[in-house]
Image: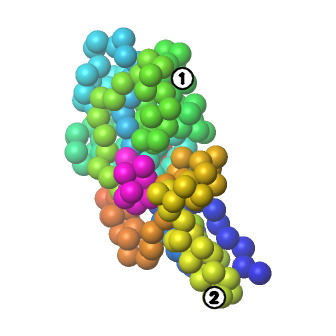
Amino acid sequence: MGFFISMPGGLTYIKAREAAGVIPIVAALGRDGKPFCRGMFITRSTREDISSVRDIKGKRFAFASKYSTSGSLAPFFHFYKKEGINSSDLGNYEHLKYHDSVAREVLRGNFDAGVVLDTVFMRYRDKGIRVIGKTEPFPEFLIAARKAAEPEVVNALKNALLELSPDNPEDRAMMEPWDDKIKYGFTGVSDSDYEKIRKMISYLSGRGIMPGVLE
């Protein structure tokens, strides 16, 4: 039976596609019913000196994993393309392992600002952080199968996931304990849906920043 990759993000999916030819099956929907997410630039609510993304120049900044689309790739793209901010403009920065770690370390004052996935921000918004900017929306989490997975198994999984609906009380009750990234249902997906991620990678690579090795 084929082995399934559970919930790779956009950057991880593209790397896996290049390395092993994985097949996209379905994309996860967000709370708004759309297959997109954003990176949210955050700071503590008490930081009156930081009101926009440009105010992070010279500040201590926390990214999520180097392999995270929303926690590293998209924010770097936003800095360089939209804000004219280079990594050297930051006072210093680190890549933390998890988005939750970024939120907690910003709250603790160990970083002046950071970036987290929009669903993570929702968990911390009442704990003392606020948004100072957002990346553009981009396709993120999906479920993919290895290239050699049996087509009948892939199709069965795809159909089962597409039939789930948070509007159906039984489905909603079953999906409620699931991770926020996948509990709002799924939609069809193709490799071409991730061209926006590829363009981010190409743009940053052209400036000497290699996604997945973002230093």
Residue at image point 44% right, 18% down: 128
Residue 151 is tagged as: 2
Looking at the picture, tell me which residue is in the foreground, 205 or 159: 159
Residue at image point 65% right, 88% down: 152
Say which residue label 1 marks.
105
Task: Report the predominant secondary structure element of the magenta stretch.
Answer: loop
Residue at image point 38% right, 29% down: 42
Point out the residue furthest to the bottom here: 151
Q: Disc 1 on helix, strand or loop?
A: helix
User: Of discs 2 and 1, which sits in the foreground?
Assistant: 2
Looking at the picture, tell me which residue is in the foreground, 212 or 144: 144
Three-letter residue code for mark 1: Glu
Q: Position of residue 154 (x, y in %)?
A: 62, 81
Tell me if 56 is positioned left or right of 23 in this view.
Answer: left
Q: Is residue 140 magenta?
A: no
- Which residues make up the magenta segment? 29-38
Q: Position of residue 186 (x, y in %)?
A: 49, 65
Residue at image point 53% right, 16% down: 108
Q: Using the image, determine if residue 77 lies above or below residue 139.
A: above
Can residue 206 be spotted in the picture? Answer: no
